[in-house]
């Protein structure tokens, strides 16, 4: 609860991801996953550096939307980002989760298009199936299908 009993935060508005090749990431998230581009901005002035503390930085930013969720992709021209070696147990951001209605079909479609999966889809509890796969810069993504349990 915030001061006066109200909420300080309303929702998670977006998640941002720094990428090495914006076009490759768009081909993945827009063309394979099905997100839609809702905004494109080129930051070549002081605004971005003022906000993020990287003086003189320059980046192209694209917002992609799926449902009510926004994924913000940054490709920095200056300074150029460096790849990180990360494991799922390392601290910080670990994966992007997507809800799907037909996990097996999406798994087969993406696998046929060359997407790397860490395993076959597995059932983690009754009616819930997941599978992890890799995005273009090695970021980990999850597909989850939750089947409705029939009332008995």
Image: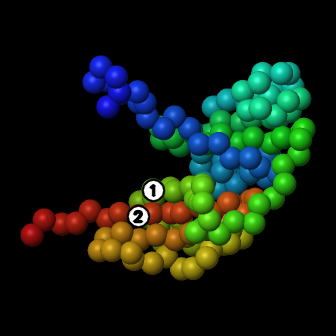
Residue displayed at 59% across by 42% down: 15
In this view, the residue in front, 44 or 67, is 44
Mark 2 vs 1: CB contact within 8 A: yes
Above or below, comparing residue 114 to residue 63 in the picture: below
Residue visible at 71% across and 36% down? 62
Residue 99's disc is 1
Q: Nearer the viewer, residue 112 or 25?
A: 25
Q: How many marks?
A: 2
In screen coordinates, is 146 left or right of 23?
Answer: left
- Which quadrant, please, contains the C terminus? bottom left
**Measured from the top left, where is residue 13 in percent x and y?**
51, 34
Residue 128, percent from left and from top: 36, 69
Dot 1 crowding, Cα within 10 Å, few <14, some 14–19, many 20+: few
| SS of the residue under disc 1 | strand
Outermost residue toward the front in this view? 3
Q: Dot 2: within a 10 Å radius of its alpha carbon, few (fewer than 14), some, or many (20 or more) residues? A: some
Q: Is residue 150 visible?
A: yes
Q: Which residue corresponds to mark 2?
A: 145
């Amino acid at each position: 609860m915030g001061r006066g009993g109200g909420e300080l935060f309303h929702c998670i508005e977006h998640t941002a991801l720094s990428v090495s090749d914006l076009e490759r990431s768009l081909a993945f998230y827009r063309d394979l996953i099905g997100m839609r581009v809702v905004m494109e901005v080129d930051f070549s002035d002081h605004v971005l550096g003022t906000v993020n503390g990287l003086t003189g930085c320059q980046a192209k930013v694209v917002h992609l939307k799926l449902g009510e969720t926004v994924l913000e992709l940054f490709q920095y021209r200056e300074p150029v980002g460096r790849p990180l070696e990360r494991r799922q147990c390392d601290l910080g951001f670990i994966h992007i989760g997507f809800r799907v209605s037909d996990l097996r079909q999406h798994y087969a479609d993406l696998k046929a298009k060359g997407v790397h999966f860490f395993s076959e889809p597995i059932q983690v509890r009754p009616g819930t199936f997941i599978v992890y796969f890799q995005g273009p810069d090695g970021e980990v993504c999850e597909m989850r299908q939750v089947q409705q349990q029939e009332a008995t």
